[in-house]
Amino acid sequence: MARTQEITEAMKTLGFGTELEYEHISREKAAKAVQSVVGGTIRHTGGTYDTWTVTAEDGREWKAVTDGSLSDRMTSAEVVTPILKWDDLGTLKEVVRALRRAGAKAEATTSQHVHVGVQHLNAKQIGNIAKIFYKYENLILKALGTRQSRLNGYTKPTDPQFIERLCKTKPRNRITLNRVWYGYQNPHPSHYDGSRYHDLNLNNLFYGTGTVEFRAANGSLDAREVMASTVLCLAIVAKAMTAKAASAKNKREYDEATAKYDMRVTLINLGLNGDEFKSVRKHLLKRMPGNAAWKHGRPNA
């Protein structure tokens, strides 16, 4: 119980942001939907991404921009949040609901990316994030329902060679971690470096934003599902922050007969236990076959 509380407390200190991709809605209309929740002012700031900016009443900026992975530049939008904190999850859910009411659609082309600030983490802790994610990756991708089309392109599974280098080198500073991530020293990576197109992306860490990015979630207009995907990412980082060590060995396999039980145990290990995370567990277990309470089915009475 004490360990779970430690993870939960760490999770609630993290800063994060998320990118929400939608079709059948213009950037202007998406920005107006955001403004209906956060208030403030709205303006067309243009530029490469045809940006519409909402400056909320608290001064933070939400943006609606273009994204090359979406099908129609005129009727699609990626909503980019400012840096959020735990208490902002309620606002995030209301923004998703406002976008749904405004006509946004979460088509097969869309996704949700979650960025978590790790400026305060050392290289070992960041390595822990990768090891924990890789260990449970098969279950996580099934739980999030990550589409195969995305796994083939913009959201490739974690490169086992990266994990092999990570476990062998055990980096203690970011210079070494950089070499482990890219496979060579890359002190000045571009924002669109090819390494970013993985379900776990460390390129942003070295590009300059100071975040790790989780790219596995599909686009969604279910506010509780968006929250569940976000909380899962926060829990992985919190687990990595507080763990004395992490191992990528014995990667968990996906077994339809035990998947729901295996994922429930994983969520408990990540600190997502108790009534507070009941909705999170519900949405992360809903795609998993099997029985959440019994690994091999309920025994005969």
Image: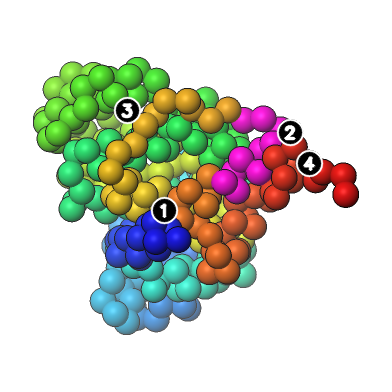
| Magenta stretch: includes residue 255 | yes
Q: Position of residue 136 (x, y in %)?
A: 49, 36
| Residue 179 in sight in this render | yes
Q: Amino acid at mark 1?
A: Ala
Could you say which disc has been placed on residue 297 in the image? 4
Q: Position of residue 13 (x, y in %)?
A: 30, 65
Q: Earlier in the sequence, mark 3 or mark 1?
A: 3
The residue closer to the viewer here, 169 or 1, is 1
What is the span of residues highlighted in magenta in the rendered image? 254-265
| Structural crowding at the residue carrying mark 3, measured as other residues with C-alpha within 10 Å and reported as few (<14), some (14–19) or many (≥20) | some
Of all residues, the one furthest to the front in this rendering is 301
Q: Write down the residue under mark 2.
A: 257
Give SS at disc 4.
Answer: loop
| Residue 299, image quadrant | top right
Q: Earlier in the sequence, mark 4 or mark 1?
A: 1
Q: Earlier in the sequence, mark 3 or mark 2?
A: 3
Q: Write down the residue under mark 1.
A: 235
Q: Write down the residue under mark 3.
A: 195
Query: Going 57% across and 46% down the picture, which residue do you hit?
Result: 265
Q: Amino acid at mark 3?
A: Ser
The residue closer to the viewer here, 27 or 260, is 260
